[in-house]
Amino acid sequence: MDLTRYPRMHFAHTPTKIESMKNLSRMLGGPNLWIKRDDCTGLSTGGNKTRKLEFLIGDALAQNADTVITVGATQSNHARQTAAACAKSGLKCVILLEDRTHKTDENHNFNGNVLLDKIHGAVIKRIPAEQTPLQAIESEVSGLSSAGKNVYVIPGGGSNAVGALGYANCALEITSQANETGIHFDHLVHATGSAGTQAGLVAGLTAVNNPLPVLGIGVRYPREVQEENVYSLANKTAEHLKLNQSINRESVVANCDYVGPGYGLPAEGTVEAIHLVAQKEGILLDPVYSGKGMAGLIDLVRNNYFEPNQNILFLHTGGSAALFGYLDVFTQ
Ligand SMILES: *Cc1c(COP(=O)(O)O)cnc(C)c1O
């Protein structure tokens, strides 16, 4: 897998560490739990969007863009990392925020990621209720284009075949880390949303012939929809990578039993997982993504989904900046 063919910036502190979660493993009496620290990618408190943005911003600069537009939910980690990547690359950044949670409190709407978007100098606009995110992007693009700007649009979550290259690269990184340490990982588990992370991982693992099973824990859609989104993007990513191999449908697996009340609304298990990992491992998860991913992992361990001697790798995709947008959940 040759990634030097694609324009790229270097933002991420990589390789990110793989650490043992000994205390959590012991407490659960389950398999050996490991955590890959993609929450520590270095760009504006880190997270999984940084790897995607290396290729997306590389592509934007190769196309001589001067302005980047992207979309996300109010507490979007993708928006925050895009704002930071644009700041570092000298690009103007316009962020269109979609109200998916209908939370009206001040912290949700102005603290956490929204505060950081602003500090990074992004222009923040709220998508009106009567507009879809796609319509909002179209009208913003046409306004900026007629003002003479060269606009580059990054889809929600940075999830297209260009962004997913970042996680194809991460698949290569995990494979090398396993080979170097001699630890055989039996499963890779992570939170899946806009699908680019899982699609990139599946395409990258296919490319390097690593049979490591990936399990995405859904945060928004039902399983059929999520798996279809991942499968479709994994195939586009494989095409973009010019793999002469198609993606095996069976390699795309999502479990969407831990979404709880909906996107951006933590379930009881989410809050428990955040407290457990903070208090057993000193690691911060988030209420929208990694907390739900970890809640899924913990529940699967409790239900003996894994063998006791297996090594399970959790990919920590970041998101802790959003905790400050959810004070109500943790101060009740
Ligand atoms: C965006 C995000 C995810 C989901 O990644 P996708 O590529 O959108 O599926 C998981 N965790 C965090 C913290 C995120 O910000």
Image: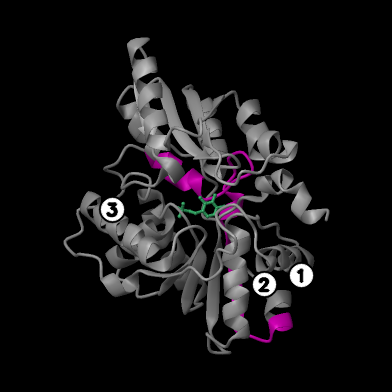
The verdict on label 2 being within 8 Å of ligand 1 is: no
Tag 1 or tag 2, which sits nearer the N-term?
2
Label 3 sits on what residue type?
Thr
Q: x, y (%) of residue 36?
A: 56, 63
Q: In which image quadrant can residue 38 be found?
A: bottom right
Label 2 sits on what residue type?
Met
Residues rendered magenta in the picture: 26-55
Q: Is residue 332 visible?
A: yes
Q: Residues within 10 Å of mark 2 (few under 14, many from 20)?
A: some
The Cα atoms of the two marked residues, 1 and 3, are separated by: 37 Å
Extreme residue in the top direction: 147
Q: In which image quadrant can residue 302 be found?
A: bottom right
Q: Is residue 110 left or right of residue 71?
A: right
Tag 2 or tag 3, which sits nearer the N-term?
2
Give the residue pinned by disc 2.
21
Q: Which mark is residue 280?
A: 1
